[in-house]
Image: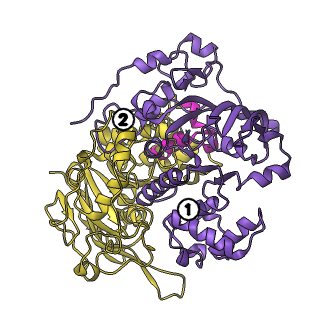
Amino acid sequence: MQQTLIALEEVSLIFRRGWLSRERVEAVSRVSLTIPEGGILALVGETGSGKTTLGKLVAGLYRPTQGRVLFRGQNLWTMDRRSFLEYRRAVQLVHQDAFAALNPVRTIYQSLKAPLLRHRMVRNGREARERAAELLERVGLTPPELFLDKYPHQLSGGQRQRVLLARALTVQPRLIVADEPVSMIDVSLRLSILQLLRELNRRLGIAILYITHDLATARYLAEEGQLAVMYLGQIVEQGAFRKVLENPCHPYLQALLSAIPIPDPRVARAIRPMTLQEIDPPDPRRPPPGCRFHPRCPYAQRICREIPPALEGPADHQVACHFAREIPSWRLSSAVSPSPWA
Amino acid sequence: MKPLLQVRDLRVTFDLGRHGRLNAVDGVSFDLARGEFTALVGESGSGKSTTALALIRLVPLPGFISGGRLLWWEEGQREPLDLLRLSDAQMRERRWRDIAMVFQGAQNALNPVMRIAEQMIETVRSHHPMPRGEILERAAQCLRMVRLEPSRVLRAYPHELSGGMRQRVLIAMSLLMSPRLLILDEPTTALDVITQAHILEILREIQEQLGLTMLLLTHDLAVVAKTARRVLIMYAGQIVEDAPTEALFAAPYHPYTRGLLQAVPTLRGDLTGKRPIPGGPPDLRHPPPGCRFHPRCPYADETCRRVEPTLEDAGGRRVACHYWQRVARTVLVQEPHE
């Protein structure tokens, strides 16, 4: 059994709108999840689902309003300073916008040198340059001499994303929180970044929290790992990736899967997106009462409007729906048999 | 029957001063058949948006149309009209009325302090004097086509609508003047998957009902599979493949098309054959000699490095590759799953 690296226990985060406003927005609502050492968890949700906020809670950039974030069993926000620094080193966040995340007037080497020296991973400048070169090689920027003295604007989007990963690696992290790392990268190059993440996971045992809106890339990276699906600040379904994808139980996940376009014209035209009561999601700042999906859900009953369902089921497949067992099952494979592309 | 629009040898040049010049669109030719749903597919920087902007002659500076013809076949006319020879005033008259375009990210460009009704009225009136009542009636019609409730939406301000609703408002606006050709630039890119699926359904519905000629720009081949009947694949400012959708997905003839399909992970089926295309797109100021795709192409040889392939006929489709027959014959690496 793998050790638990990070655990969230009933974590909620409430933002106050504006400075003096009394209006409150619950961006993350009673989320519990665990990330084992060396594991991969894909956190999937659409705009406004709170997935980025949850990523920042895991990375310690937000302090939860309620609930606890545990790092190796210790509460992040009550642990001593030394443990906190250790945590800060062990958990690294990699942003979507690699251009914004790199200092434009620093060379790649300078961007890598700073954390190396600060965290005493190396003793001097010469060692720093050697280590920086090693790291660039590790993330596939070879030969490293070609990249060390370049500025971010001289690199392509994919290369910048690799530099961010190299920078995260400077401090030998145990978990990389990757927030939409490929959404700004050309389609033809996305897989190379995902392959790199997978390699870091396999070779170095670094756990990955992959945050995305794209279930297909999540499958590519995390099929052997875990999946958590978020909707309006809550986890509606989670478990072993394969199990959840094989038998999606929450109406939201079913609707989402039915709507994902498939690169095969015969299949794509045979599948209709599931009919919802409302096409557009509600304003995430004002989530509906009861089950947050109920205004759009085709199966909603009175109880759904009133009582929020709890996440229930065995650890490898949990669903938050009052009628998870009653509603018709929906399977990806029930459609026309796909061509090799789909 | 003559196509609606024939694009011939279109070239758009950007003059970057001391940074040189580049052709963002470099000798592009294709036809848009009347009433057909065509998709123009390319990654960022491929020139697809610039091509679309050239069709309505709105290429932003420092770019300009440096060559080609845009032959517009009015119904019943024997001779086509070259849109590039029209005066600016004449062209302005044709925009919205003949060719309408929904720009990328435009759902965020609606006037925030004006109700939707007023914006729709203004759009029509800037082209054609028409009484308010008539315009509102037409607006309601168009909104219903995109499955929006006119009584609610017309009174709303943009911020009261979701992103998906705003995008549908824009599609409705583009239909106001009953254009012959509707160009949509990445109309679903910033939207949620569920919203995207519904908008694609709506587009297909409108296209069929109105017999509209549609050109959809996207980077996403899966979106194409759902909607278009024909696909144009663009790479580094040129069209590399032009084929009916089914045929293209059944067997891509250009190595770039094949590479793109192999680079997209999917929800079902085997993922082991998935791989990225190596390298990156070329710097268009110094495009590679020969075939522009050759530095990334697994089929490339000496010929590809020297000789630029032309878009040649390949039996009901066109492809720009010296070795398309070999590419077409290549057995797929993957086996269908289950």
User: In the picture shown, does residue B90 fall above or below A18?
Assistant: above
Residue type at the position of mark 2: Trp
Which secondary structure is most common in the magenta stretch?
Answer: helix
The colour scheme of the drawn protein is by chain
Which residue reaches farthest top? B302
User: In the picture shown, does residue A7 fall above or below A97?
Assistant: below
Query: Mark 1 falls within which chain?
Result: B
Say the numbered circle drawn on residue A341. Answer: 2
For disc 1, the marked residue is B167
Q: Residue at x 22, y 48 (%)?
A: A242
* Span highlighted in magenta in the image: A145-165
Q: Is residue B245 visible?
A: yes
Q: Residue at x 70, y 27 (%)?
A: B286
Q: Spatial distance from mark 1 to mark 2, Cα to Cα?
A: 30 Å
Q: Secondary structure at mark 2?
A: loop
Q: Residue at x 37, y 56 (%)?
A: A91
Q: Nearer the viewer, residue B172 or B254?
A: B172
Residue A164 colored in magenta in the image? yes
